[in-house]
Image (cartoon, grey):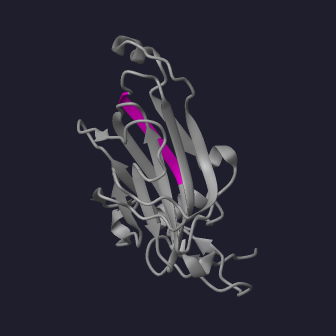
Amino acid sequence: MASIKGSARQTTSVERKGEGVDVYMRMLRDGTVGIADLIALWSLEGRVFTVNEGTGTTASTFQAGALDLTEQDMHVVVPASVVIIPLEVGITFDLYGAALIVECCMQYGTGSVAGSGTARTPKSSNANSGLTSACTVTGACATGTAFTTVVGEIWHAGVPLGITIATVAQIRMEHTFRYRAVESGILQVVGPSQQLAIFASATAGFGFITLKYAELPASSI
């Protein structure tokens, strides 16, 4: 009877070899062969990070008015050492404002700078891994700099109307907008040395943004 051996790696000493190098089959520590869902393996390794703008009962104040690419509601700087893959974005509005003008989008490119805002700390999917994100995340950027080059727009959603509504009517509208990479079947690689920006524009919007992304050494992609 044949015996299959692999390298038991889950959180520590997970090796990433160069292109074309022979490697042992990867297994979890209970012997499960590591050919399962790629995102699940990244999560166990601690390489998936979650960062929030607005938490609990404290909503973030989104930038008011029409979509302004200099006012990022979440801004991520990806350094030269890593790349990130946006896995999920959730935007929930507590309030839209008097006029129903709502746009949510996520872009990436170069030349974008976060303006006045609040630093946010991404949290690893596995706190036991000891991994921290190399990215710099800023929320509620009121006076940022737009991309000099937009490499791509990954996601766009919203309510494409500009009508005045009573406050009570807002409860009938869609309040949560969500992007999931697994639904598109595409893992969009951002970086190295690029920026990712998320916008949640409304006339007087308040709410919450949750971003989940995988972060990998630039040499491994």
Q: Position of residue 215 (x, y in %)?
A: 50, 67
Say if 99 sits above or below 181 in the image: above
Residue found at the far left of this picture? 58
Does 1 sit left or right of 83 as displayed?
A: right
Q: What residue lies at 50% left-to-right and 80% top-to-bottom?
A: 81
Quadrant in the rendering for residue 37? bottom right
Left or right, residue 118 beside residue 219: left
* 22 to the left or right of 155: right
Residue 116 included in the magenta stretch of the image:
no
x, y percent for residue 95: 35, 27
In the rendered view, would you say 213 is above or below 5? above
- Quadrant occupied by the N terminus: bottom right
Q: Position of residue 112 (x, y in %)?
A: 48, 64
Instruction: Give the left or right position of residue 76, taking residue 19 as reference.
Output: left
Residue 106: give x, y in percent of width and height: 54, 50
Specify the principal SS of the magenta part. Answer: strand
Count of marks placed on residues: 0
At 40% from the left and 52% from the top, the residue drawn is 74
Quick check: 55 above or below 41? above
Q: Is 93 covered by the magenta stretch?
A: yes
Q: Quadrant of the C terminus?
A: bottom right
- Magenta highlight range: 87-95
